[in-house]
Image (spheres, grey):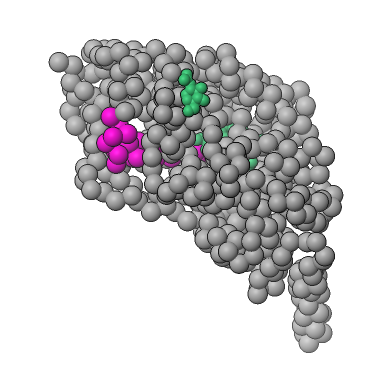
Amino acid sequence: MVLWSLVLGALLVVIVGYVCLPGILRQRRPQEPPLDKGTVPWLGHAIAFRRNTFEFLKCMWTKHGDVFTVQLGGQYFTFVMDPLSFGPILKDAKRKLDFSQYARGLVLKVFGYRAINGNNQMIHSASTKHLMGNGLEDLNKVMLDSLSLIMLGPKGRSLDASCWREDGLFHFCYDILFKAGYLSLFGYTKDKEQDLLQAEELFTQFRKFDLLFPRFVYSLLGPREWLEVGRLQHLFYKMLSVKHNQEKDGISNWICYMLRFLREQGAAPDMQDKFNFVMLWASQGNTGPTSFWALFFLLKHPEAMRAVREEATQVLGKARLEAGQSFPFQLSALQCTPVLDSVMEETLRLRAAPALFRVVHEDYILKMASGKEYRLRHGDIVGLFPYLSVHMDPDIHPEPTAFKYNRFLNPNGTRKVDFHKAGKKIHHYTMPWGSGVSICPGRFLALSEIKLFVLLMVTYFDIELVDPDTPMPPVDPQRWGFGTIQPTHDVRFRYRLQPTE
Ligand code: HEM
Ligand SMILES: *[C@@H]1O[C@H](CO)[C@@H](O)[C@H](O)[C@H]1NC(C)=O
């Protein structure tokens, strides 16, 4: 008994020592950025970082300046906060910074998907073919049909459609965008009513996963939640399984292309199912929340709503929706909406907050715009959090927390692309999609579908907040770093189809 305790005790000491020692021994070397290991061995600043990434980084930035290294759960992260110095990191001409290594680990943990070789290139070539250019035009048509089906029902406008209904705006937007996006990308069966029911069920489960997601990524779930996440993962594998979906037609070329590639590379069927889950997450996790913020900002800023409606009337003409009809909508209108484009850019500036990470493959010299050079160590991670260092910089965007619908418009009404920091023109003046090798390959589709939805809402519907004085709901601090942030609670609104006379 005593012997066992001794052995166990010794083992524990060895393990703890092994885990914590590198942290305790690590010292800042010449030319390295300021090092902040935090007070807790191994964990370092992990708790503060996970609780509120935005506040934590703000605090470190004030304390250490534009570049600093922090310990987070046994890993060292160097954050670069000066956007004029992003260029070399994002271009990474010498290929010393690696995105896919970081992404692979995350995707395996969260979705159970073991990335094949060339995964990233496959996603990006599929997306260039099918989520941009002509491919995107085809998808826009499907998306319009899907939105009509979901918002009006299979029979088009019904007679009693112009009575007021009430809902949570966040739930309303997320539900519609999710179902439309899912059906457009993953396909329909012969039975549309059944498809709608299945999409509805998928959304209910997706939201459960969505709410657990940030703490799951950070391994902070309690035992019950952990079991729940496992259950949800298996449910998604099943609902999205390639076998189950063989009878579907109208699966998007985007998904088809990627699944064909996986089959050719010999990926097992269960890996293909898991891949579908990854793609469901990537394609549906941000568009709904972004649409919510866009509509909410419009509802809170009547001058912006007026400008968007005026532009919509200009490009779409006086819209009329007769009984039994689905939305008449000229898709080419999506190309001529500078005002709505500015509203979208402003919404994303205020609410899209991704963190970008790259693993340092070889010791690396970071050249700052100031001319200063820093050494970064092999095995560490470089992090960017453009929301704080770019989107909220008052030098680049005066009054950064205010919603200004025309912030991205020139006085002559064209798209504004000239932004400055410290008197220098800045290339990355917003980064809602990430940048460089990992830039979101779905960004054009995302913008089309959100714009389409917003245009339908402002053109064919009357919408208003139940309480016009509803304050801006606070954002959930756990979601900093994961894309579009979400409100901590929903906002009641009412809507109706505009009466026909
Ligand atoms: C408003 C909506 C969206 C936002 C804000 C958004 C943002 C992002 C961001 C920040 C990344 C990661 C960049 C990085 O890690 O450096 C990303 C990756 C990705 N996004 Fe989006 N996205 C949106 C919509 C979409 C849509 C509609 C699709 C597809 C139909 C899509 C497909 C993907 C894929 C496949 C990746 C992973 C790319 C890779 O592994 O290299 N996204 N997105
Ligand atoms: C509109 O204004 C911007 C800058 O204010 C300028 O660069 C652009 O050429 C102008 N475009 C037109 C069509 O006048």
> Height in image: 75 above or below 436?
below
Reply yes or no: does residue 446 show up in magenta: no
Residue 321: x %, y % from top left: 26, 14
Residue at image point 71% right, 65% down = 34
Magenta-drawn stretch, dominant element (helix, strand or loop): helix
Residue 297: x %, y % from top left: 35, 40
Observer-nearest of 85 and 162: 85
Left or right of residue 194, residue 8 in this image: right
Q: Quadrant of residue 449?
A: top left
Left or right of residue 63, residue 373 in this image: right
Q: Can you name the residue that lies furthest to the left here? A: 501
Q: Quadrant of residue 458?
A: top left
Residue at image point 73% right, 37% down = 91
Magenta highlight range: 285-306
Q: What is the number of callouts on the image?
A: 0
Residue 260: x %, y % from top left: 69, 21
Ligand 1 sits in which quadrant?
top right
Residue 78: x %, y % from top left: 70, 56
Residue 197 in view (yes/no): no
Q: Can you name the residue that lies furthest to the right here? A: 362
Image quadrant in which the N terminus is located: bottom right
> Height in image: 195 above or below 357?
above
Residue at image point 60% right, 61% down = 61
Observer-nearest of 295 and 8: 295
